Image (spheres, rainbow, N blue to C red):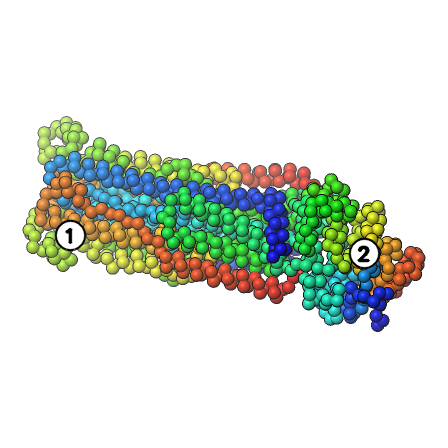
Amino acid sequence: MQILKNNSSQVVIEAKNLRKEYQGKLALKGLNLEIGPGEIFCLLGQNGAGKSTTINLFLGFIKPTSGAAYINGLEVASNVTRIKESLAYIPENVMLYPNLTGIENLSLFSSLAGFKYSDKELRQYLENAGLPAEAAPRRVSGYSKGMRQKVGIAIAVAKHAKVLLLDEPTSGLDPKASNEFSELLLNLSNTGTAIFMATHDIFRSKAVGTRVGIMREGELVEVLPASDLEANELEKVYLNHMHL
Amino acid sequence: MVRDIAKKEFLSTLRDSRFIALSILVLLLLLAATLVGLYSYQKQQEEREVAQQTVNDQFANSTERHPHRMAHYGSYAFRPRSPLSFLDFGLDSYTGSSVYMEAHRQNSANFSQAQQSSSLIRFGEMTVAFVLQMLIPLLIIFLCFGAFTQEKETGTLKLLLSQGISMRKLAWAKIKGYSKIVALVVAPALILVSVILFAQGNFEVNGDILLRFFLFILTYLFYFFIFIVISVVVSALNERSSTSLVTLLGTWILCCIIIPKASANLGSNLYTTPTKAEMDAEVHQEVAKGIDGHNSKDERAETLKQELFKQYGVNSLEELPVNFDGIVMAAGEKHSSKVYEEHFDELTETFENQNRISEYAGFFNPYLAVRNLSMGISGSDFNHYIHFLKEAEEYRYNQSQKLNYIQATQLGYGDKETRLSSDTWKEFQAFSYETPPARWALQNHLVSIAALFVWLIAVIVIGNKLIDKTKVA
Amino acid sequence: MNQFSTLLKYEWLNFKADKGLLILTSLALLAGLYGIYYGTSEIERQQENIAQLEIIAQENIEEMKDKYPGDADAGDLGYYHYTFAINEPDSWAGLSLGQRDLNPYYLKLRLLNLQSQIYDTDNINPLKILSGNFDLAFVFVYLFPLLIIGLCFNILSIEKEQGTLPLLLSQPIGLPIIVGAKLVFRIIIVFTLALFLSIVAMWWAQVVPDIRIVIWIAAICMNCLFWFGVTFLVAALQKNSAFNSVVLLGIWLGLTIIIPSLLNIYVAVKQPVPQALDLTIKQREEVHGGWDKPKKETMERFFIHHPEWQHTAPIEGRFDWRWYYAFQHLGDVAVEDLAIDYQESLRKRHKLANQLDFLSIPVNVQTTLNAIAASDLPSHLNFIRSATQHHDAIRAFYYPFLFNQIPFTHAEYQDEPEHSFMSTPDFTTANKGLVKLFISTLLVFIAGFLIFKLKGASVK
């Protein structure tokens, strides 16, 4: 098995022979992966291919059957709390405390991560994430999915993490918001954030990714540098793997 | 289509192992409560029968006594338990089991079970009625809280409705399915009760017991039905199973724990119960204005004397063909009993006023309606208790008067020495008590019956309206 | 610790914004205030009634003075004159009424046979007794556990169900801290409420400020902690909210109603109480048999118990009060063993129930509170014992008048023995109750921690 190296010498997201078994069924069959600062790694694959399992392993939400995941050089399974100081996460469906306002939600999560922001700063983060200014002081129970997703983005950004883990973050966003989100990712990557994004969206992967991985039945079957390909070529490769 | 859905609910519930476990637990408690109830019923009944027989024999075989001594020797009334009270102890554990009946004195009913227990009894008793009134509704809630919310959460509701069935039909189909399940849980216990009632010769089965048992079952079937409909409707009105469940559990707590206690407490706060000492003192004062049986020199006795002289055309007590002692005693007893009865009725009325709060609260809380009705049908309610006390008082009065009559007719004036043989006492009919018929029991609970019917109609009518208004998406 | 206080702060924000929780807490507060009002007003009413009894007793004396304007025969007074033995409520009784509503708190006593007077009951509405008292103890024993369950049943499951757990856990924070902070927040709320209600109740009832304040508060707080422990234990199973609420209500029902009712059956079978019916019947036979026995025989039997009156004037004639009261007393003597047996077996029954109450914390707490408030069964039995002693004192007061045949003048009423009794709190039972409560609380928390450790944290 080849080790998929990134260009830089530094590694912030790393998987070594990472395996996960659920009741005798392998969900992840020995993943090896290295992602460096400023890289955007897009993981494509069908539902059940093992994308979310991979992200959950990096988050320490589940324990690997064998092998190890590393964030910033620390093994995840034995540093479940510490690794979270250096990573941010946006789930597919950002769920917040419905009785709290957008600002309060952001303030809560930032405080837990150790950041104390002023009200003005909090509003700024939310606005930067694309949340309308008038929505920020309203209760989240009235938010649409897209608005919650934007609060999720603000939470991730406000954490100033070295690693950003994304699980289908653009689902539910309208095209305009998606584009803004892509821009945001590129900006973060420019500041040196390593980004790992599981997605269905082939075109966006091509647009923002530095590398694109294709996962099938728990195996990383292909890793391509995004710059080498045209979007339709990537789609062809992807579909080839799916129909294998 | 309705039948298919009812069958689907029935089968899928039977496949839910958690529900099966709970049902078995409830069923076991129900069976245990039946047997424990029967055991304690039989034990108490036997004790009381033996005690009653003992005092009856003692009276009949009493030595030679002066009739007024015999009136003070008196007798006891032991309250036999109503046959169906092994299903619902009702107030039986809190009411006195024996009354001492003597001349010129109305004694309290003493020795209740509760007084002989530690504070444990205040937490409630394990009876069939307890399981039926409190636990089965909880089981129903658990069974039905997800009736619609689960279908909403999994999205099957829209799928079902797209097949052309209406919400209303769907709801009734579910109610039908759940009713079957509840019947399945309760039936074995009812069969056991029937076996106990009819097969083993524990009871002299007569039409009245059968009628009461039938009414007992009917009451609870209505009650379960009401709870099933409420649960299904609440489930239809909620979006999430957890909120539906919490709403229903909160309702249960309010209906079965808080309101019964609060309404009984409120009743006693609103209508003050006089103490027995106060009541006795008042009775004593009022009686003092009447004839004192022990004091024939009394003014009113004098009037009575003059009347008798006129009636028999004589001039002295010795000439009277009847013994004036007995006549005065009888007049005194009549007067004091009348005064006592007035006060007792007043006390009963105070208690009834207190209880009325709980009775009318039945319109807001089906638990209370059923609790009252169930006690009434089982013969363990307040009315049956008072009925017994009144019968005992009537017996006491008649016995005293009969002895006064003997004194007036067989003994001479001022005779304190003559003792009559025990043959005289054997002629007295011993105290025996018959539980009044079911019809009488029901008459006392018209409010609760009305409340139950109002609930029955309300859940159907309002339930239908609410279900029609339910938003599917 | 910083994260902890952040969580506390946002729990507060959440709590303030959640109408359901606010309603629940306000209801508990209202129920508590009503419980205080009800309990204290019930005791006030008993006190009013007790004051009324003094008037009734005084009226009886006036009536006697009217009836016997000159010197009276003590025998007549023994028959017609009565006094009351009173079980004065402890200042704490309003907080936990216990059995004070069920057992009479006064007894009307005459010189007659004691056993025919001592089991009389007061006018009680059985339906009200069946329904029980809505006192502060009820609020703490029954309703606070429900409040705690209502506040905590979804303490962890809601984070999963509303989907906030993944985002929360992607912060550098462990599950134990999250659950711990939420639990501590709720404990603060409930403790504040419990302490507030307790203090209001103590102030309202004007309780005697002694060590019982500490015992009461310790019992109440530990009771709350126990139930928090139970919710913690169930949260550790990491099931959904519906499962939690059913299981928690099931535990509540089991501990508060089902286990006590089963214990009641067990205790009744295991520690039978000899039928008091036998006692009353035997006592009647003895007393009424007295009329038919030769006077000499009766007096000789009486003098065995009261040799001091042996050498008084012999009994002659058809009727003599001395002889009458002698056989009245012999009626008591005849059933003395039965009476002691009856009361002892009631004590044993209470003791057995106490020994088993570790099986049900609500019973344990109720027992503890009743013991503090001196409103339990032993308190009543102590009152009966005291009333018996009072009856002895009445006899000792009247016998000289009877046997020395001294006329009873109006001045003598003043010297009649007076009865005063107030049950003393049972600290032994209360302290034992606290120890059992402490151990149970510790056990549920340890079990909860173990399950949390064993199961680990799962996001889904």
Image position of B28 (left or right of C392): right
Q: Secondary structure at mark 2?
A: loop
In this rendering, does residue A222 appear at all? Answer: yes
| Residue for point 62% across, 46% down | C13
Chain letter, disc 1 residue: C
User: Residue C144 has which mark?
Assistant: none
Q: Quadrant of residue C179?
A: bottom right
Image position of C126 (left or right of A4): left
* Of residues C308 and B97, the one drawn nearer to the viewer in this rendering: C308
* Of residues B458 and B387, the one drawn nearer to the viewer in this rendering: B458
Q: Which residue is mark 2?
A: A191
Q: Position of residue A96 (x, y in %)?
A: 69, 49
| Residue for point 16% across, 33% down | B298
Q: Quadrant of residue C378?
A: bottom left
Q: Position of residue C384 (x, y in %)?
A: 28, 52
**10 Å crowding of disc 1: few (<14), some (14-19), many (20+):** many
Q: Which residue is mark 1?
A: C326
Residues beneath discs 2 and 1 located on the same chain: no
In this rendering, does residue C146 appear at all? Answer: no
* Of residues C441 and A179, the one drawn nearer to the viewer in this rendering: A179
Tell me which amino acid carries mark 1. Ala
Q: Secondary structure at mark 1?
A: helix
Q: Are marks 2 and 1 in contact (CB under 8 Å)?
A: no
Image position of A91 (left or right of B423): right
- Between the residue at mark 2 and the residue at mark 1, the CA separation in whole angstroms equals 109 Å
Q: Position of residue C424 (x, y in %)?
A: 32, 53
Chain letter, disc 2 residue: A
* Of residues A137 and B211, the one drawn nearer to the viewer in this rendering: A137
Q: Nearer the viewer, mark 2 or mark 1?
A: 2
